Every structure is written in structure tokens, then in C-alpha cells.
Image: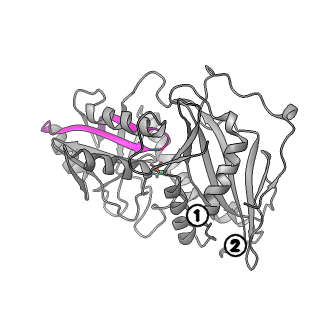
Amino acid sequence: MDLDLDLLPPGRRKAKPAPDQDLPFGDIYTDHMLVVTYKEGQGWAKPRIVPFADLCFSPAAIVIHYAQSLFEGLKCYRRRDGGLQLFRPRDNFKRLNQGAERMCMPSLDLEFALESLRKLLHIEQDWVPCSQGSSLYVRPTLIATEPHLGVRPAREYLYFVILCPVGAYYKEGFNPVTILVSDKYSRAAPGGVGNVKAAGNYAASLYAAREAQAQGFTQILWLDAAEHKHIEELGTSNMFFLFEDTLVTPALSGSILPGITRYTVLDLAREWGQLKVEERPVSIEEVMTKARQGKLTEAFASGTAVVISPVSEIHYKDERVQIGDGQTGPFARKLFDEITAIQYGTKPDTHGWVERIT
Ligand SMILES: *Cc1c(COP(=O)(O)O)cnc(C)c1O
């Protein structure tokens, strides 16, 4: 791949975090980043790997005013033999391209996106932590940089990838979360952009999440925007319910983000064959009724950052229901163990999900 390198001399690189250092999510960045610019009529310029630094673009850039902006999130894992690997990265770049289509932004060639990320990871490989459960979080981002205040798709873009070492999400073991069902706010409307990782979705979610946290809940459970009847997502992760012997997740409605961990959970559950697996609309009434009857045995969310996040309590209107015995259920734990084993290479990858970097 033709790529320009502008690397820091070793003496000017940052000290890597110590193996036992706390790595809060998204605070520490590696020494370098990948940047590629796009101009209508010219296409993508030659990719560059440059020192991590502030970006420079006009205050009139379209991304600032009209949020033409998309991101992805995936992780690079260190295997026990010291090698590095990614989990289903092609699915992240496919999703980025689906978002680009929806947001009138240019798409990236899949092989180009993967190959340029590989190059960056090779350069930054010493930044991938080795402590249990830690990884290097990868944040590909696409923004509209053209200065223009009329509302229309930009003609200039920047694609960049930054990396940050992150610690295990669960430091003191698997902690189930309590959740508040929002019957007042909505995350994404039918026909909107909830099914792509558009930056504006997250700005729109902050107020409700802050209100839930002020009331002592960890996360907000979003219902559909049209009727506030059907479950959509938990915060920024996908939701699953275990109703006795049936695993159910809301069918992709157009306003639900198609999570790669969600597909992974569905694939594994179907393959194991112990449970019925259903993707269908799930109403909050059904969840509350089954919970009251003791038929909601587990509830959990899925996403790259958390992998699996068990839920212990649901609060809806003035009612609170506990799920199972309020502890992490065996199915959530089994999924967590299996997915992380594949991601860290302690179990063989029989699905073609893993992409080795080194
Ligand atoms: C990223 C994201 C998810 C989870 O997707 P994964 O690919 O599993 O990480 C779920 N919901 C929302 C809103 C998201 O932004």
C-alpha cells in the first residue's frame, strides 16, 4: 500500500502505560494516527500516518454546523503468544460505508480501510496492553471538513483513525446494571439515522442519560420513538432477553444500530442450539409481564466496549422488577467467556471472525 509515514523519533514518543495502570476509557492516545483526505472530483488522497495531534480545519467546516460525521469502534487484542488480532473488522468497515451512504459521505474501499489500519497497528503495536481484559480501542472516524454554511453534503472529507489503550471493562468482576426505561425521550426516530453510527445520535442521547444517572440508574433503556412501546436499545448497546428457554432481541427496526456483538451473540446462541432464538419486536409490556411472572430469567446488553453487560433491575413508570436473582446469569456469563476467548485467541476461531495483525 502506498502510504506516507511521518513518524516521531523514538525519543519523542510517549511512555506506554504500566501493565498495572488504570486505563479509563478514551483518555490516553497512542503516538500516531492515520489520516486520509477526500475531495470531490479527486477521490481519496494518499493515506498518511502522522504524529497524533490536533486537527486543523475551518470553523465553517460542515461537520461542526451540520454534524456530517460518522464513527466506528473496534478493538485490537493481544493473544497469549504476544501476537495481535482484530475481531470482525470487515463488519465495522461495511457498517461505516452503510453510514456513509446514509449521510451522503464518500465510501472507503474495504481492503484499503483494513490494510491502512493494519499498517497503523504495526507501527503502534507496543501500545496494545497485555493485562487481562485490556485492549487497544480503535476509533475510525469520517467527517465533513469543507468550509460552507449552506446545508448540503460537503465536497471535502477527512477520514482518520486514532487508537487508545483501554483496561478491562469489568475490573471488579461482572457487575449487573440497573436501568431506567424512558417513556419520555427517544434515541432515534423511524426513518432517521439511528441505524448508523452518526455522531449526532450520541449528542441527542446525553440529556436523557444524565437524567437517568441523576436518579441512580446506570443506563437508559430506549423505546421506539413512534409509540414508546417497543424496546430498542440500552444506552449504546443492543438488548437481549432470556424468556425461559427463548433468547429474544428486538428485530432491527431501522432505528436500532446493527451491533456486531449482537450478530455474534445470535450466531453463537443459534449454534449452541440449547435455546430458541428470536429477532422480533419486544414490547416493554411483555418484558414487565414476564418479569412479574418470573419468566424473565436473564437480561443483558451487547457491545464492543462491554462485550456483555448483565442487567439486574428494570424500572418502568413506577414499577421496579428484579431479573432472576439480581446476579449475572449463566447464559450471559457463557457468552462473555466464549466471545472474549475468541477475541483473545484462547479458543480457536471457527467462524472466520479473527483477523491476525501479527
Ligand atoms: C456501537 C453501538 C452498538 C454496539 O455495536 P457493536 O458493533 O456491537 O459494538 C449498539 N448500539 C449503538 C447505539 C451503538 O452506537
Query: Which three-letter amino acid code belongs to the residue tagged 1?
Result: Leu
Q: Which residue is mark 1?
A: 110
Mark 2 and ligand 1: say if the CB distance to the nearest ligand atom is below 8 Å.
Answer: no
Q: Which residue is mark 2?
A: 154
**In front of the other: 195 or 14:** 14
Q: From which residue to which does the magenta span run?
A: 293-314
- Dot 1: few (<14), some (14–19), or many (≥20) neighbours within 10 Å? some
Which numbered marker is on residue 296? none
- Percent from the top left, x then y, of residue 318? 27, 39
- Indicate whether residue 313 is drawn in magenta: yes
Determine the residue positioned at 61% across, 24% down: 22
Query: Which three-letter amino acid code belongs to the residue tagged 2?
Result: Ala
Q: Secondary structure at mark 1?
A: helix
Q: Nearer the viewer, mark 1 or mark 2?
A: 1
Determine the residue positioned at 42% across, 31% down: 216
Q: Is residue 34 above or below residue 13?
A: below
Q: Quadrant of residue 25?
A: top right
